Amino acid sequence: MTNRRSPQRLVVLVSGTGSVMEALLRSAEDEAFGARVAAVVSDRPGVRALEIASDAGVATAVVSPGEFPDRATWDEALARTVATFEPDLVVCAGFMRLLGAPVLSRWPGLIVNTHPALLPSYPGAHAVRDALAGGAKVTGCTVMLVDEGVDTGPILAQSAVDVRDNDTEESLHERIKAVERALVVDTVGRMVRDGWTVEGRVARLG
Ligand code: GAR
């Protein structure tokens, strides 16, 4: 994939605190980054991520599953909402729901996710807890493209984080997120500036 326009438009999907989204938003304020955050879309109203985005003058939207009769209708509404912001790249930054076919098929190979473990170890919603319970001595974070599976898409970049004997889920996740913010900024920046390729399961930046 190569650049289609510059700066490219990022739509960031969030569910909570938004510290990864904020790192991206701040970096993208520099013109040299090659992309800007066009909008932040949440599945939950009132989350900190939306406040950060609004304060920064970025458009926000909420597409909450509770407001739709079923999963399929929510999937369609999410796709429609994201589309109104005309993204070149969709970035899931702490978005805690699986994306359905309406979103996946509209931006094939153009959706990025970040996950707090070294995939393929510890996929799913409790990656940090699972790594601790599994006795991992090293874990970390993964930035990958999204496919139909749960955290199974081609890996773009990874960073390792040591697990300490006295770690709690919270302390470990905070150390992972510190590394993860830099990894997401670096990876998305390289994607929008230099492009990327995917052959089978192997993704390469630049
Ligand atoms: C990040 O660690 C991200 O990898 C994780 O949520 C956190 C978001 O933090 N995402 C997942 O676990 C997705 N399965 P933030 O709200 O502070 O940006």
Image (cartoon, grey):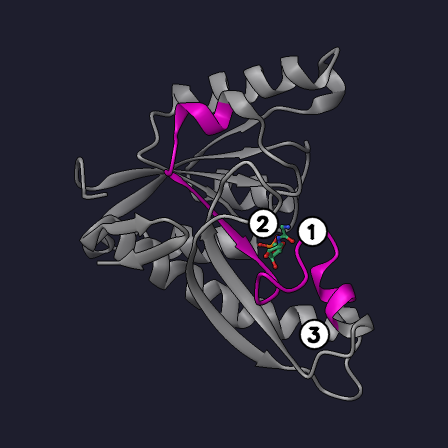
Q: Mark 1 and ligand 1: say if the CB distance to the nearest ligand atom is below 8 Å.
A: yes
- N-term-proximal mark, 3 vs 1: 1
Q: Secondary structure at mark 1?
A: loop
Q: Find disc 1 in the rendering and name its residue.
A: 124
Q: Quadrant of residue 166?
A: bottom right
Separation of marks 3 and 1 at Cα, in angstroms: 17 Å
Q: Find disc 3 in the rendering and name its residue.
A: 172
**Position of residue 82 measured from the top left corner of the image (x, y, whole percent):** 46, 25
Q: Mark 2 and ligand 1: say if the CB distance to the nearest ligand atom is below 8 Å.
A: yes
The vertical placement of 24 against 91, above or below, is below
- The disc placed on residue 151 is 2
Q: Which residues are magenta?
A: 103-131
Tag in front: 2 or 3: 2
Q: Secondary structure at mark 2?
A: loop
| Quarter of the image with the N terminus in it | top left
> Which of the two residues, 198 or 77, is positioned nearer the viewer here?
198
Q: Amino acid at mark 3?
A: Leu
The vertical placement of 41 against 192, above or below, is above
Magenta span includes 114: yes
- Do the residues bearing badges 2 and 1 touch, measured as CB atoms within 8 Å? yes
Tell me which residue sits at (78%, 89%) in the image. Answer: 165
Q: Amino acid at mark 2?
A: Asp
**Position of residue 147 measured from the top left corner of the image (x, y, whole percent):** 50, 39
> Which of the two residues, 109 or 163, is positioned nearer the viewer here?
109
Tell me which residue sits at (63%, 46%) in the image. Answer: 48
